[in-house]
Amino acid sequence: MNRNRIFLITALIIAIIALFLLYKEKYTVPYNKDLIYLDVSYGNDSQQKYDIYLPKNASSKSTKVIIYIHGGGWTNGDKSDAKKLISYLVNSNPEFAIVSMNYRLAEINTPIKPAFPNQFFDVGLVINHIKLEQKKYHIKPEFGLIGTSAGGHLALMYDYAYDKNNDVKIVCSLAGPTDLTDKVFINNPSFKLYSNSLFDSSKYAINTDPLRAISPVFYASKTSSPTLLMYGDNDVTVPLSNGIQLSEILKSFSVKNKLIVYNGGHGDYWDINFENNLEDFISKHFKN
């Protein structure tokens, strides 16, 4: 009896250790200084930095690049906040180079450092910097963009309005705003307080509606890249209607897109189906 009990306890301990090691392996980026470049500067601002994780067998013929853009309301956040997601992307996509980028954050109530269009430009600066370093990184200069919340908004806007060279081949928005003229944003007191300071009016035409000028739904076209949209059915920050609206517009242009509605609020996309849905989309639209 005692032997059986000892055997069962030992087996349980071994199983727990095995599960821990499996989880650790799945969500821990293996640090190898020859394969990872951290805090690479792509501009003069201290916030203009990115990390790049290269696969062991990187090749200029096949190694495409996935860029992740963090959220934070365009005024906060850092690439270090996305360790779990970056670990997942690195370990689940060994044939890709994975990039996590920072960008110039807006300073509220001051015209010194507005978000737009600076943050759109920063996405392009990262892409151009990686293209310049493509021989060093051994990458094929084709890019996928994935962004969360404000990062999703930046990913969509860059692809739809700023990617003149067609460098971006897919884009994924995890609860990113698509229509900032929506009453959910306009009637939000917090958004009202700083929305005007996000916008550098000198970089836009006179009498331009600032919220319309930075809303991806008004820039979607037949040249938009295949788009994956994930939105919560109980999101009070970015309404599900934003995702539905954009999906319908993309369909009208015959752009391949998929809208996934998950149960929960703004940051609840990471459920049992998230990985499968993302991998399926990447496999169909971005793999060689």
Image (cartoon, rainbow, N blue to C red):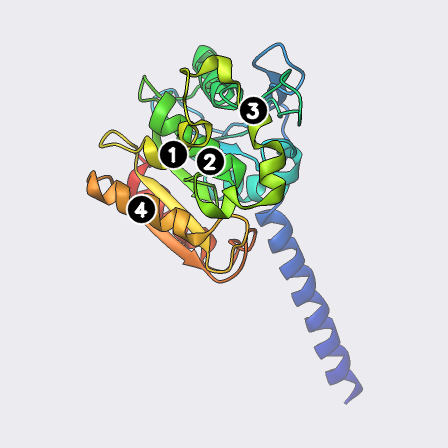
Rendered position, 226 above or below 243: above
The x, y position of residue 197, in whole percent, is 59, 25
Relative height, residue 163 to residue 286 (above, below): above
Alpha carbons under labels 4 and 1: distance apart? 11 Å
Mark closer to the chain start, 3 or 2: 3
Q: CA distance from mark 4 to mark 3?
A: 25 Å
Residue under circle 2? 153
- Could one spot residue 49 in this view of the protein? yes
Q: Earlier in the sequence, mark 1 or mark 2?
A: 2
Disc 1 from disc 2: Cα separation: 7 Å
Query: In the rendered structure, are the residues bearing label 1 and label 2 in contact, judged by CB atoms less than 8 Å apart?
Result: yes
Between 28 and 130, the one nearer to me in the picture: 130
Q: Locate residue 127, reporting x and y percent.
A: 45, 19
Q: Quadrant of residue 17?
A: bottom right
Q: Which residue is mark 3?
A: 115
- Density class for disc 3 (Cα within 10 Å; few <14, some 14-19, many ≥20) is many
| Residue holding disc 4 | 247
View extreme (right): residue:
2
What amino acid type is highlighted by mark number 2? His
> Which sits earlier in the primary sequence, circle 3 or circle 1?
3
Marking on residue 78: none
Q: Amino acid at mark 1?
A: Pro
Identify the residue at the far front of this view. 207
* Residue pointed to by mark 1: 216
